[in-house]
Image: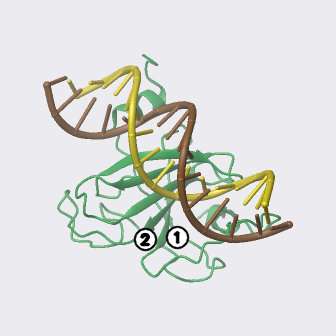
Chain colours: A green, B brown, C yellow
Amino acid sequence: MERESEGGGESCVSHGSSVKRREMEPLRSNSYRVLVRTDPSDSSLIVKDGYQWRKYGQKVTKDNPSPRAYFRCARSPDCPVKKKVQRCAEDKTMLVATYEGEHNHKPPGGADRTSPPASGCAAISLADEPATSVPVNVDLTLSGTSRRERDLIGASPR
DNA sequence: CGAATTTGACCTGCGC
DNA sequence: GCGCAGGTCAAATTCG
């Protein structure tokens, strides 16, 4: 891969710098992070992982100047899965999706995956390992589906 | 008309 | 005990 696979990727997941707040989450057993490679022109925080997510919040953290988006499973209200999507501070072309919990249902797309992202995902990363591991770059091709996406990508700002 | 997304405000937890 | 940051909820707005 390119350089993002190592240096960039590492910096993306763990900022072992001056930040001493909650920059390092313990990551529960059900939590895992996924790096999604997107297009630089794609400014949306939508990660197509085969599931349907509903955005319920967005916040800007000190770690990353980019806003972090919070998603919940929109398919089942009983699904305890939560997803946090944040753009990489080093490489704005990559999105770091943090999944917490596992789905109580199968992906609507028909995929067979139960926890890791489906829809032709290349790989996942960091299940419960130290942040020193090199994450895998997932090459998810974002298919413009959300209404906001069109807006964000660069259509008519209404 | 219904569903989804966006933005702001509020609440909780942790660190100093 | 106070302050800061992160996370969540609710109301409003817009698009299909």
- Answer left or right for A147 relative to A41: left
**Other residues around mark 2 within 10 Å, as few (<14) / some (14–19) / many (≥20):** some
Expressed as whole percent of the image width and height from the top left, the position of residue A73 reads 31, 57
The reply to whether callout 2 and callout 1 are in contact (CB within 8 Å) is: yes
Residue closest to the eye, A147 or A62: A62
Which percent across, then down, holds residue A88? 62, 54
Q: Residue at x 42, y 77 (%)?
A: A30
> Residue A81, relative to residue A92: is it above or below?
below
Task: Say which quarter of the image contains residue B10.
Answer: top right
Give the image location of residue A96, x and y in percent: 54, 59
Measured in 3D between alpha carbons, the distance from the residue under mark 2 to the one under mark 1, in whole angstroms, is: 6 Å
> Horizontal placement of A84 versus A150: left or right?
right
How many circles with numbers are drawn on the protein?
A: 2
**Secondary structure state at the residue bearing disc 2:** loop
The local crowd at label 1, few if under 14, some if 14 to 19, many if 20 or more residues have their Cα within 10 Å, is many
Q: Which chain letter goes with mark 1?
A: A
Pointer 2 and pointer 1 on the same chain: yes
In the picture, the quarter occupied by the C terminus of chain A is top left
Which residue is at a point 61% across and 75% down the rendered structure image? Answer: A134
Q: Mark 2 = which residue?
A: A123
Question: Which amino acid type is shown beneath numbered disc 2?
Answer: Ala
Q: Quadrant of the N terminus of chain A?
A: bottom right
Q: Earlier in the sequence, mark 2 or mark 1?
A: 2
Q: Residue C10: image x %, image y %?
A: 39, 40
Horizontal side of A106 relative to A117 (left or right) equals left
Q: Amino acid at mark 1?
A: Val
Q: Is residue C4 above or below residue A157?
A: below
